[in-house]
Amino acid sequence: MFQQGIIWPDNNGVHINAHGGGVIYHEDRYYWFGEHKIAGEAGNLAHVGVHVYSSKDLYHWEDEGIAFSVSEDPDNPVVKACIIERPKVIYHAENDEFIMWFHHELKGRGYGSTLTGLAVSNTITGPYCYVHSLRPNAGEWPLNVKPFHKRGVPETTKDSYCGGPGCLSGPIDTVNILGRDFKKGQMSRDMTLFVDDDGTAYHIHSSEENSTIHISRLSDDYKSFSSEYVRAFPGRYMEAPALFKHKGVYYFVASGCTGWSHNAARSAVADSIFGPWKELGNPCISTGKETTYDSQVTCILPVRNRENAFIFMADRWKPENAIDGRYVWLPVQFAEDGKVFLAWMDEWDLEYWSRGS
Ligand code: DGJ
């Protein structure tokens, strides 16, 4: 039974500590990777690393320890008290390697570094070895670049921390953030990964001062960016991107951009991962829909051996005591017109899909 927002104990009776997480299925088990938080406001920084749990049934989770640890070395970019958020792991079958990408901010610089970090392991539970962090697609224009972006960048288009709508000096396609960051690489904050049916992997992240999502194809070994990418939802200020595929159609779910405060979710659909994407609106339909039932999406998980079964996984953040963040999981429902929706359920279980609901 999934019960929303309560303590979810692991096999040791300790609340699962895997926030901003992602789940992958490998050799008969699910593995849930997420941010290990500590108590208090300090817990919003990475003091420990990425925690991993495993489960056969999605209800009972075994603590598999810290998959990726922060460093004690002040010269290491992933030093303790940097920011590591939304870690996601994918498996490269040919190389038999597990590839973790995460949102990385250097220690003491708030959310201004806007990096994505890479760590790799030969075993799913780790330890993952840190490779490096980078700003994606340096020196590359997206496939759907506009002439405006190539026309140059006025001096006034400065680096800034942008927390949401209204923080740029004008509408997105009058402020050339893409051009500003062309040489040094594009900003990458909230992120997710998606592996398509043909094994091609994509890195999806909030970019351009959080105003626009970038969808990038990763290299064949999943360890670098291929240089092929698109801008999506320009000026829509989305965070927490999650992507899944159902019956050949790509679905996108994300949040708006309001820091740790919960806001209304967004959804969109496309026939190609590179778009065009069509927004479908807020997928939540019950009371509480304006705040995504007090949560923010982190991943949409396909359930094994069940048809049309996807779980919306979300965080109920507690920034004042980060370790106490809770989880909201709901079944994704599909309407006849192709829209996805999320109805509130205080509790539910996987038999939801057997009941033909
Ligand atoms: C919203 C993001 O989705 C979170 O992952 C985190 O970065 C917070 N913003 C920080 O305010």
Image (spheres, grey):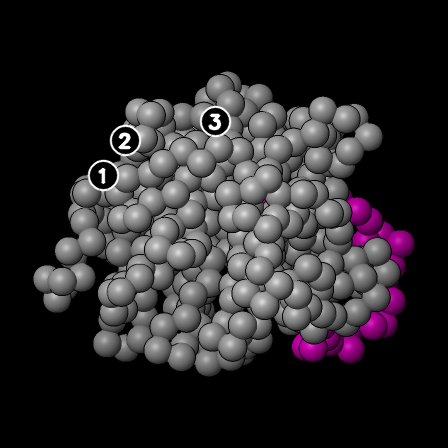
User: From the Cβ of disc 1, is ligand 1 less than 8 Å away?
Assistant: no
**In the rendering, at what x and y percent does residue 253 appear?**
43, 59
* Residue underneath mark 2: 6
Instruction: Inspect the image, locate mark 1, and give the three-letter code of the amino acid beneath it.
Output: Gln
Residue 165 in view of the camera: no
Residue found at x 15% / y 56%:
351
Q: Position of residue 144 (x, y in %)?
A: 68, 77
Q: Residue furthest left?
A: 355
Residue for badge 3:
322
Q: Looking at the picture, which amino acid does disc 3 mark?
A: Ala
Upstream in the sequence, badge 3 or badge 1? 1
- Circles 2 and 1 in contact, beta carbons < 8 Å: yes
| CA distance separating discs 3 and 2 | 15 Å
* Mark closest to the chain's N terminus, 3 or 2: 2
Q: Residues within 10 Å of mark 3 (few under 14, many from 20)?
A: many
Q: Nearer the viewer, residue 141 or 196?
A: 196
Which label is found at residue 3? 1
Who is closer to the viewer here, 177 or 184? 184
Residue 267 drawn at (x, y percent): 41, 63
Q: Which residues are magenta?
A: 142-169
Residue 352: quarter of image = bottom left
Residue at 47%, 39% in the rendered image: 52
Q: Quadrant of the C terminus?
A: bottom left
Answer left or right for 267 relative to 67: left
Q: CA distance from mark 2 to mark 1?
A: 7 Å
Q: Residue at x 33, y 38 (%)?
A: 61
